[in-house]
Amino acid sequence: MRKFAVVLMVFVFMFSFGVQAKAFEDDFVSFENCISSNVPVWIGGLFNIGYERKITENLSAKVRAAYWALSGLFNQEGEIENFAMGYIGADVLFYPAGEALTGFAFGPKYDLWMGGFTALDMINNPTVGLQLHFVGAQVAHKWVFDSGFSMNIVLGGLANVAVSAQAGDEEYIGDPPLAGIFMPFFDFEIGYAF
């Protein structure tokens, strides 16, 4: 599944370079980079940061990372304890109005959630390494002010397409947390463009 995600991103990058860009106005402030964070999820202990880079006049790439500080809530008495989770992700955003990093955008999204837990329901209570692969789509609108302050609203969905769980040298038998789910999402990001 990783190969499919990589091929999809390469495909989008290849064919987007031929798209004609919108001409700049003389007094328009242009930004090449943006660092941002999804604010509402801080309440749930998901501390995150993202970096978006303008690739062409109407295309950008974004990388993200997060650590879920409250992931221990998935502990299940007698089955799972010491649960911890974080993720890395990548987005490709197409801005049809012709100015990357500002305005309406849409594109694919890929997340790799990684974590671990102690399996109390297995012999010797091994530590289980967990990887969840998510793919999805998103639509967004970003406002960037002359000072560089940015706000971004994102709507979309992610589907779990692959799960890998290893307990030492053996495959974990059971249903890992978050496996096989579909997650709609709403992000409100604040950041700084430069």
Image: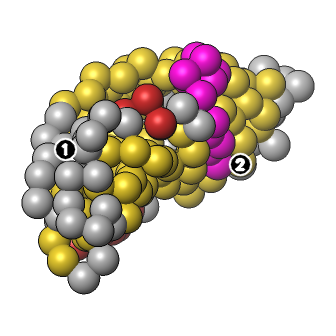
Residue 62 vertical placement versus 70 (above, below)? below
Residue 50 vertical placement versus 187 (above, below)? below
Q: CA distance from mark 1 to mark 2?
A: 37 Å
- Secondary element at tag 2: loop
Q: Amino acid at mark 1?
A: Ala
Q: Position of residue 106 (x, y in %)?
A: 37, 33
Q: Residues within 10 Å of mark 1 (few under 14, many from 20)?
A: some
Residue drawn at x 38%, y 53% as measured from the top left = 117
Residue 47 vertical placement versus 108 (above, below)? above
Q: Position of residue 101 (x, y in %)?
A: 61, 37
**Residue at the limit of the structure toward the bottom, as seen here:** 169
Q: Position of residue 8 (x, y in %)?
A: 24, 61
Task: Report the magenta residues as a range.
Answer: 39-51
Q: Which residue is mark 2?
A: 32
Residue drawn at x 30%, y 34% as measured from the top left = 76
Q: Quadrant of residue 79?
A: top left
* Residue 179 image label: 1
Q: Amino acid at mark 2?
A: Glu
- Please name which of the two marks, 1 or 2, marks the residue nearer to the observer: 1
* Residue 160 image label: none
- Marks 1 and 2 in Cβ contact (< 8 Å): no
**Residue at the limit of the structure toward the right, as seen here:** 147
Q: Position of residue 97 (x, y in %)?
A: 47, 29
